[in-house]
Image (spheres, helix red, strand yellow):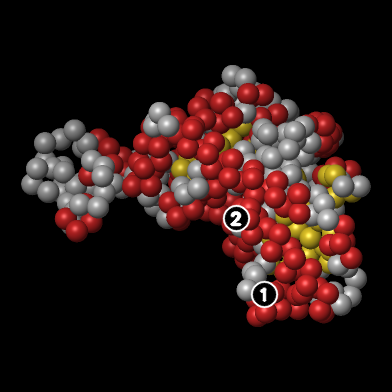
Amino acid sequence: MNPQAQELNNLLLANNKNVFEMLSQRGKSIFFPKKGILGQSAEAKSTKINATIGAAIEDDRSPMRLKSISDRINLDPSFAFPYAPSFGRPDIRKRWQSLIYEKNPALNNTPVSLPVVTNALTHGISMAGYMFLDPGQEVLVPNLFWGNYNLTFINAYDARITTYNLFKNDGLDVDAMSEKLMADGDKKVLLLNFPNNPTGYSPTVEEMKQLIAAISKAANAGKKVVVICDDAYFGLVFEDNIETQSPFAWLSTLHENVLAVKVDGPTKEDYVWGLRVGFITYGIKGGNAELYEALENKTAGAVRGNISNASNLSQSLLLHAFDSPTYKQEKQEKFDIMQTRYSAVKEVLKDGKYQKYFTALPYNSGYFMCIKLRDGLNAEAVRQLLISKYSIGVISLGDLLRIAFAAVAATDVKTLFDGIYEACKELA
């Protein structure tokens, strides 16, 4: 094993050996190479003539660039064209950490790691897999989950996905999750995705307490639990009494056997799908600077070995947005539009006629909601008919149709559901 990796492992062992044992073999072996080319480049950063960096420089020492590109970027060239660090820009890392505390007041002043920048959330999920999944490792997810987990966990890392029942009596089936956590095996990897894709469901305040208690029960029984919080749709909660904070807020102080891994970013929160910036942040009870720095170094090493670094331009644009005096007002305006679309769905589905052919699964947040078709109706056949005859696009998932109300104007919601109703009626 590389001595730099062993040095990081020793820090983990000294501060919480459980965290070391949670790592995959890749996670144990990875390190950020501070003593090679990167280290030498860092040492030469202040030199007058710097011939270490792998980027071209103009004679005035600004980044070399094409005018046809730079003329269209209203930023200092140094914020756009050079490489960003593999950890991410230090300024955006600190700012995103402050936003995590602001959005999750239950954290109080609990120490958590500085976020490491990823190439948006899919890459963040993949880096969590790199750090914690060995071949054959079981990943617990609800039976309604984002299909890309299959590619990320199974195809990329040879892990196994095990599902548990998501809903029971119009709410979360916390007992089903708890049963899987308490099953045989000392190490458990649990993925929580709220608001859930595809259902658009987030826990109530009481359900969140039950969920955290179930994880605590497993930890107290000696299980080492890695909880990956996929917070892609964080903040988009449209009902009262629904928990608006991430499970990360409570998991970060829960138990020395529970490592919370928060994967989040501005993709959906700030409506910047194409900028491809995400973050991965760690929290564990008793976590200190040494432990977190070791995890950050390992994660940055995984990022460097995978994509080198995320876009400097995207990080800079986002940082400017976060610093804008109108940032919160702009976000509220977009949230209000989303709330209106959600409310339009709730209002339209009050009409009992639709229940002849489909019923809504529980939903209260996010981008999506799902309808379950009555027995005998084929979701894929309905989907195809909606495209060909009604010019309506939805996603079929088994006997469900997933509807992205986030992409539908409130004035079109009734037309959408009436079209689904007519297609079901025709195929019934």
Residue 77, numbered label? none
Q: Which residue is mark 1?
A: 390
Question: Which one is nearer the viewer's eye here, 353 or 92?
Answer: 353
Numbered disc 1: secondary structure: helix
Spot occupied by residue 20 in the image (x, y as percentages of width and height): 62, 38
Q: Quadrant of residue 216?
A: top right
- Where is residue 316, by image quadrant? top left
In the displayed structure, would residue 360 be above or below residue 390? above
The crowd level at tag 2 (other Cα within 10 Å; few <14, some 14-19, many 20+) is some
Left or right relative to 326: residue 129: right
Quadrant containing the C terminus is bottom right
Marker disc for residue 409: 2
Residue 9 vs 406, above or below: the answer is above
In this image, 398 relative to 311: left or right? Answer: right
C-alpha gap between disc 1 and disc 2: 17 Å
Q: What residue is at 67 percent from the left and 24 percent from the top?
A: 106
Depth check, front residue: 157 or 248: 248
